[in-house]
Amino acid sequence: MPSHPSIARRPVAWGGDHTADAIADLLAASPAHHVSGELIRKRLKLTRSAVWKAVGRLKREGYGIAASPHLGYRLDREPDTPLPRLIRNGLRARTIGGAIHAFRTVSSTNDTALALAEQGCPDGTLVIAEAQTGGRGRLGRRWHSPAGSGLWFSVVLRPKLAASGAQALTFLGAVATARAVRDLHGVPMTLKWPNDLFLEGRKMGGVLTELSAESDLIRHAVIGIGFNVNLPAAAWPPELKAIATSLQAAAGGPVPRVPLLRRILEEMETRYAFLQRSGPAALVDEARALTPMIGKIVRIQHLGQVREGTVVGMDPDGALLLRSAAGTVERLLAGDVSILR
Ligand code: BTN
């Protein structure tokens, strides 16, 4: 649970207005050129006041639209905001992000996604928020999720997988994110088992997988991904300053969030299809290759227990294999790892 009580407020949805979608498309088809109000009204069969309202809505969503009484409306700038119409624009994934629920603010996208999953939403449904008031990490830790600076989202999956294979779903989110960041920005992300995205000793993101299972079979899973994209160093709360980082620091400047999100969803889609066809082995292999702790001497803390040893590998379920000084190999399913040497 979050370290502060979540605020029981109705989430504020955004995007998803068909009139605004249609006007945004029309203006985007002639960027930097005026489109007359009359043309918009005729083409979309709208009244003057409906156009005016929808343009106001687009402006509130961050669109730069110039309005001139004689010339009409001109699109100067699209926002880099995870609005459904912007996410869908050019998305090469069908299942992941096939349905999108976007919010200005929610308590936790995982909570919203879990509720939607219970209500029967489609496989691959994306829930994304500009800000979270009760973002959660593993072991009930709070996840700092301010507006405008990160990607905070959850994907509902209905995999054919035993609950004991759930670590593969965490890898699915982590590997897809690491690959997208590597491919688009050349930043060599690594995984810190079991669920962290790391760069040079600092955490840039994390994955929280939550499940509903029946007789060891997953009914649905929610993969929650938090990725710090454009948080300037000065904006971190004091307790996170030394341990967290964001992509903008590594990339040398602000990074557009929506194209990165699209790429993550596409990377998830290919791996999800493969997981459904062939099982988790390939994902575990990919995660292993991105995990630099194999071969290192580590300390692992979990539920008050501390273990030390050498990481000798990962088993087919994604459990970490730790060899103690006495030579016995233990299989660990969770824990906080510190690399000693
Ligand atoms: C961790 O590092 O412990 C996992 C962090 C996961 C955070 C994401 S943000 C989107 C989704 N909603 C949440 O409340 N948590 C996950």
Image: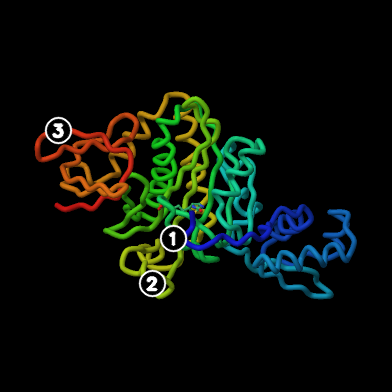
Kind of residue at disc 1: Asn
Mark 1 Cα-neighbour bin, 10 Å: few <14, some 14–19, many ≥20: many
Residue beneath disc 2: 233
Kind of residue at disc 2: Ala
Of the residues tagged 1 and 3, which is closer to the observer?
Answer: 3
Of the residues tagged 2 and 3, which is closer to the observer?
Answer: 3
Disc 2: residue Cβ within 8 A of ligand 1's nearest atom:
no
What sort of colour scheme is used for the picture? rainbow
Horizontal side, residue 156 vs residue 50: left or right:
left
The alpha-carbon separation of the residues under discs 2 and 1 comes to 11 Å
Residue beneath disc 3: 328
Residue beneath disc 1: 228
Q: Residue furthest front?
A: 304
Q: Residue furthest left?
A: 326
The alpha-carbon separation of the residues under discs 1 and 3 comes to 38 Å
Q: Does dot 1 land on a helix, a strand or a loop?
A: strand
Q: Does dot 3 land on a helix, a strand or a loop?
A: loop
Tell me whether circle 2 and circle 3 mark residues in contact (CB < 8 Å): no
Q: Nearer the viewer, residue 239 or 147?
A: 239
For marks 2 and 1, the one nearer the N-term is 1
Tell me whether circle 1 and circle 3 mark residues in contact (CB < 8 Å): no
Against 109, is 253 above or below?
below
Tell me what residue is drawn at x 71 percent, y 53 percent.
16
The alpha-carbon separation of the residues under discs 2 and 3 comes to 43 Å
